[in-house]
Image (cartoon, coloured by chain):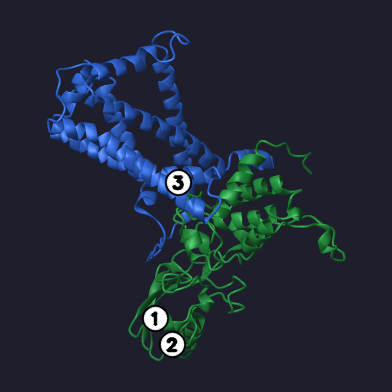
Chain colours: A blue, B green
Amino acid sequence: MASTTLSVHQKALRSTVVKKAVMAVTGLVLIAFLLMHMFGNLKIFIGPEAYNDYAEFLKQDLLAPILPHGWFIWIFRAVLLVCLVLHVYCAIVLWLASVEGRGKTKYVRKNRKEQTISSRVMRWGGITLFLLLVFHIMMFTTGTITPGWSGGLIEPYDMFMGAFSNWWVVLIYVVFMVVVCMHVRHGFWSAFTTLGANVGAQARVVLNVLAYFAAALLLVGFLLPPVAVLFGMVN
Amino acid sequence: MKITLKVWRQAEGEAQGSMETYQLDSVAEEMSFLEMLDMLNEQLTAQDIEPVAFDSDCREGICGMCGIVINGSPHGRYESPVPTTTCQLHMRNFHDGDVVEIEPWRAGAFPVIKDLVVDRTALDRIVAAGGYISVNTGSAPEAHSTPAPKLQADRAFDAATCIGCGACVAACPNGSGMLFTSAKVTHLANLPQGQPERRRRVKAMIAAHDANGFGGCQNIGECASVCPKQIPLESIAQLNRDLIASLFRADGKSA
């Protein structure tokens, strides 16, 4: 076994705590992305031009002329993809460690005192939101699934209006966002704690309040535009 | 009062066990939980049934030897108004006719030896990896020669109250020993005497933690809520800070 020859430093580098730290950093990057994405979506309320121009700007002009036109979006996607891959990889390794940690025999009776629902559905919730993320990308990024418009990628505003005039698409996104926000609720607090920010009982309260705030902000911010479109309040 | 007990019975050397039901007819509310188990064992012995094996020693809540899961909660914390060890839980917290389920700590790192007795030497192996300071033995040094700031001294003392019972591992949905490990790390990291080995200690102890079959921490908080000594959850954040910082500092030559 190679593991017997590892130095203490190398073992520590491969420890569960470091994997958690990687999950924390990548998770916080993804939360920052979600907040930006949510804010951008609200431009649907300003009008087609504002929304389409913003989408175009993200893809073509952001950081230009530092970067050539059209480069930013690919760097951005690459960073997100790396974060996602690292996050999921560490989650899988930690999940396996946790299965070993729990042991083979289960409690006949469990009476948990402290846990929240969000904290206990991090893994299955993570899988659910990964699948919904694939669905989301197949709709708006690749134009493979096109409910409400006829094929391929069209103007972002038209895709948005078309998709969310279907009640079932809105319903899927409500589920999507509830899962995302539960994941963020525990993940936000957990990420900061893993990085050492939980310095005392008050810090724990502050971090949890911030976590609820971030999750609620995302939930409301992300669901406002689709629901408004469904009920014809955007035109 | 009458109590129906459902107790995990597992013969020594067996991988599997099952819950067996026993009746106790005259449990006094003044009895501690372990005295109630003693009563059960006297009854079982008289009936020529093998008594239930369970760990206990000081019976005053300071040794960390006792520890069973009562009604799904380590040390019966769910039944108790205050943080408690099993020996300090009293039958007055139960009612006539209650059904009480008793199980051993269940964790990958704690194999069951017999009935309610588990092997907790995995915790000793974590301590052996670095939960100490290296000093020469001899007469105690003058205490005033190494001043410890009050805040750090308090934190160290609070963490040092950990009795190593393993309730945190038993309560954790991941079978993680992080609260235990972090209590040891916090204890020594806050004292001047712990500084020379601080970085190496945290690395060695987390390596031992992971190597002994404990799971990772998800910051759920079950551990701290059942801890009889109220080791705070922020101990884990202290461990995380120390570990992350230690990765960016060089060690000396390894022995």
Q: Is residue B18 above or below residue B223?
A: below
What is the three-letter code of the residue carrying label 3?
Answer: Trp
Query: Are the numbered discs 1 and 3 placed on the same chain, yes or no?
Result: no
Look at 14% across and 32% down and name the residue there.
A230
The quadrant where residue B255 appears: top right
Label 3 residue SS = helix
Provide the residue designation for mark 2. B29
Dot 3, crowdedness within 10 Å: few (<14), some or many (≥20)?
many
Residue picked out by circle 3: A189
Tell me if mark 1 has few (under 14), some (14-19) or many (20+) residues whose alpha carbon lies within 10 angstroms of its own.
some
Mark 3 against mark 2, which lies toward the viewer? 3
- Vertical side of A116 occupied by A65: above or below: above
Q: CA distance from mark 1 to mark 2?
A: 8 Å
Which dot marks residue B59? none
Residue B34 appearing in the image: yes
Q: CA distance from mark 1 to mark 3?
A: 36 Å
Residue at (38% x, 41% y) in the render? A214
Tell me what residue is drawn at x 68 percent, y 52 percent.
B189
- Amino acid type of disc 1? Phe
Residue receiving disc 1: B94
In this view, the residue in front, A96 or B10, is A96
The x and y percentages for residue A82 are 46, 27
* Chain for numbered disc 2: B
Q: Chain of mark 1?
A: B
Mark 3 to mark 2 CA distance (whole Å)? 42 Å
1 and 2 marks in contact (CB < 8 Å) = yes
**Residue at point 42% right, 45% down?**
A210
Q: Amino acid at mark 2?
A: Glu
Q: Position of residue B43 (x, y in %)?
A: 45, 89
Q: Nearer the viewer, mark 1 or mark 3?
A: 3
